[in-house]
Amino acid sequence: MTDPTQRSGTTIAVLLSAMMFLQFFIWGAWYVTMGPYMSASNMGDSIAWAYTVGPIAAIVSPFFLGMIADRFFATERVLGTMHLLGGLFLCAAPWAATQSQLLFVLAVLAHMLCYMPTLGLTSSLAMHNMTNAEKQFPLIRVFGTIGWIVANWVISALAFDTSPNMFYVAGGSGLMLGVFSFLLPHTPAPAKGSAFSVRNALGLDSLVLLRDRSFAVFCVCSFLVCIPLAAYYAFAGQFAGEMGFDKIARTMSFGQISEILFMLVMPLCFARLGVKWMLTVGMLAWVVRYGLFAGAADDQIKWMVLGGIVLHGICYDFFFVTGQIYVDNKAGPKIRGQAQGFFVLLTQGLGMLIGAQLIGLLVKRYTTAGVEGGPSVIDWNSVWMFPAGFALAVLVVFVLFFRDRPQPAEPSPES
């Protein structure tokens, strides 16, 4: 394996950028359009379960990273192995769908159990091989968002929006990244020789921060607001298709495009709004998005659907990115990593898991059988009103009880 010190900074940057691009190309090639594919393949009853396996994997992955990846093997080797296995599971998903809905969901679960740990692995590998992570990492990470967008456009250009072929594109990309990973700079196991701790894996040491009432309010609201968020990931693609958008993946990519644009204006917004109102705007955007979806449902008003999708940039950047910064500032250097892990567990894990199941039950409740054997009809107006109301209730609680108190400055040695 080539020593990273023998490679130029430009070469390493290109390798890391390509890694990030493929990392999120894989996810974007199937995640957005799996719902429309399942609906078109008469697997609509299992959509909620298919979108529940990601949160399950997000809960499991810290244990894998803590017990195995961080202690025994070089990061690039673990990354390559996991992507090779995950790519094979994705390629097997179309066959699994011909056997049973359960087998298809299990194939997606197997892939996500391999894929979710790689999100942390790519970040840690990239930052290990940087000289200034604060300046360099955002420039590398943005290629991940670009990869997701390109994947959406490729799937739509190939007319795979409801085709099982999307899984071959994604799986093939996973196999490609698996091979490519072994060419990445050698990155030793970061926690080699140290003992594994469940508390560290789940970030439980960061629970001490809950003594701060505002931080506790932030955590509870973050968990609760991710319950309606799951509705967007699980059913927005299917909804866009039924509203008349043929290129579903390409249409949904406008959410990631806006994510890049709003990321650029975040520093200015931070200076003017502060943490509390940045988070508030993020939550409010979720309410408005679901309100637009509900208003568009009956008359298939495309501009309202597209407007709701474009709001994803505010929804994600103003809430999740701001939330990560807030957690980072509150935690301090000693428990910073654990606090971020706890935040992910609450939101991407528990919140999204519960939300995916609840939205599945909600869609089932508002689905009526088609006339004379025709396709089922979903009352999308009623479906979207529930997450809109839920997000609004969380927003009100947050505004009333959250107080953004600046951290007191630590005393200097002189004082």
Image: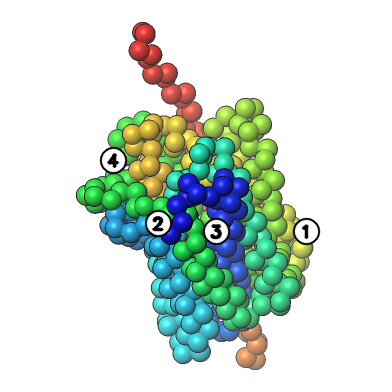
Residue 72 position, x and y percent, is 29, 58
Give the image quarter of residue 377.
bottom right
Name the residue located 73 percent from the left edge and 73 percent from the top edge.
157
Q: Secondary structure at mark 2?
A: helix
Gap in angstroms between the C-alphas marked 4 and 2: 25 Å
Gap in angstroms between the C-alphas marked 4 and 3: 32 Å
Name the residue located 33 percent from the left edge and 34 percent from the top edge.
334
* Residue wearing tag 2: 75
The amino acid type of the residue labelled 1 equals Trp
Give the image quarter of residue 216.
top left
Which callout, 1 or 4, points at the residue further toward the start of the chain? Answer: 4
Residue 219 position, x and y percent, is 41, 42
**The C terminus appears in which quarter of the rendering?**
top left
Which callout, 2 or 1, points at the residue further toward the start of the chain? Answer: 2
Residue 271 position, x and y percent, is 62, 27
* Residue wearing tag 3: 19
User: Is mark 3 in CB contact (under 8 Å) with mark 1?
Assistant: no
Query: Residue 303 got which mark?
Result: 1
Give the image quarter of residue 247.
bottom right
User: Is mark 4 in CB contact (under 8 Å) with mark 2?
Assistant: no
Gap in angstroms between the C-alphas marked 3 and 1: 35 Å
Q: Secondary structure at mark 3?
A: helix
**Viewer-closest of 155 and 304:** 155
Which callout, 3 or 2, points at the residue further toward the start of the chain? Answer: 3
The amino acid type of the residue labelled 2 equals Thr
* Residue wearing tag 4: 205
Which callout, 3 or 1, points at the residue further toward the start of the chain? Answer: 3
